[in-house]
Amino acid sequence: MDRPAIQFHDLHPTPADLAAEVVAALRRRPRYIPPKFFYDTHGSQLFDAITATPEYYLTRVEVQVLKANAAAIAARVGTGSLLVEPGGGSCAKVRILLEGLRPCAYVPMDISREHLRLAAEQVAAEFPWLEVHASCADFTRTMEVPATAPEGPRVAFFPGSSIGNFDPEGAVGFLAAVGTLVGPGGFLLIGVDLKKDRAVLDAAYDDAGGVTAAFNLNLLARINRELGADFDLEGWRHRAFYHEARGRIEMHLVSTRAQTVHVAGEAFDFAPGETIHTENSYKYGIEEFQRIAAQAGFQPDAVWTDPQALFSVHLLRAT
Ligand code: AVJ
């Protein structure tokens, strides 16, 4: 079967980045491995499975909010823009916007190469009029639009509350980079999970079916596979909880016993109960997030939520 024509730009981080970052992370205390390393091909599939669990409301509710307001979004943003999606590995939610926005081109950027390639080809097949320039890159390091992409007023799309992976200062830095990417007058449409009842948040990150646990533990399996490490997955378990004072979900991998693990030729000791912190997922009130965005040079244009105020979608404009 013919593959649909997409332009694929490969800026993929080399395996050396994984090795260097993981070893550095395991030498530090507290031990923190950034969540971007979850997303190998299997990890990306597990994340998609999380979004289908009953507890993980974020994706379902955001899709509802986008669908309910797609026309309003298009009316504010206009057509013919260059639509850029950092971390847009599944190209899933953008489908809701494409007919209304009719962008001159769509540029998904993602760290997970094959996941991105397949998704970009699918979206190109479904929307034959759409020009797709996929860019395989670590968007926490580079957010360049491929030189072959057409010119148009730029709109960035950053759904899923992925902004929650940054701490608030990091979020300001990332948003400022998005501001540079879209330029003055450019738009950012961003999904942000709202603060809410702890029980709802805790369940969303520790589903009864164990999909989130498998997603977290896959990080160790990936390190074993790609770095020849010897993590015994039986000796680790998933922990996730909402830290109210910090306004964030924390995910950890907990060592269930004393153990020594070898990674890239180096030995690391873990005491029972010691953790590797693998993810933060910050939650923001509406005004709280608008203040963060303002620090990065964005002004609010519109904001939409669901009737239960679980999730927010902000349209922001770079000044
Ligand atoms: C993709 C970062 C938005 O924080 O909710 C889901 C990742 N981690 N379940 C989130 C995730 C555990 C997700 N983001």
Image (spheres, rainbow, N blue to C red):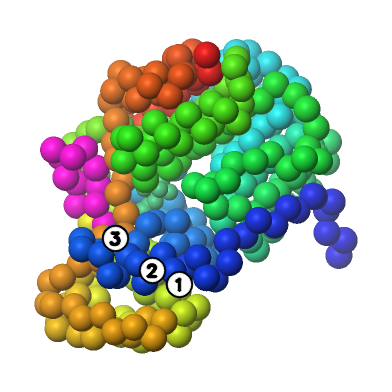
Q: Is residue 212 left or right of residue 183?
A: left
Q: At 21% across and 38% down in the image, what residue appears? A: 247
Instruction: Residue 297: tell me if it is visible.
Output: yes
Q: Is residue 28 left or right of residue 319?
A: left
Q: What amino acid is labelled 3 in the image?
A: Tyr
Q: Secondary structure at mark 1?
A: helix
Q: What amino acid is labelled 1 in the image?
A: Ala
Question: Camera-side residue: 17 or 79?
Answer: 17
Residue 207 image position (x, y, % from top left): 29, 58
Residue 184 image position (x, y, % from top left): 59, 17
Q: What amino acid is labelled 2 in the image?
A: Val
Q: Which residues are magenta?
A: 241-252
User: In this figure, which residue is indicated by the disc labeled 1?
Assistant: 19
| Vertical side of 303 occupied by 56: above or below | below
Q: At 38% across and 35% down in the image, what residue appears? A: 171
Does 87 lie within the magenta span? Answer: no
Residue 147 image position (x, y, % from top left): 77, 40
Q: Secondary structure at mark 2?
A: helix
**Is the shortest distance between ligand 1 and the CB of mark 1 under 8 Å?**
no
Is the Cβ of the residue at disc 3 closer than 8 Å to that at disc 1? no
Question: Camera-side residue: 282 or 62?
Answer: 282
Q: At 37% across and 45% down in the image, what residue appears? A: 165
User: In this figure, which residue is indicated by the disc labeled 2?
Assistant: 22
Residue 88 image position (x, y, % from top left): 58, 45
| Vertical side of 89 occupied by 78: above or below | above
Rate crowding at label 1 as few (under 14), some (14 to 19) or many (20 or more) other CA atoms within 10 Å. some
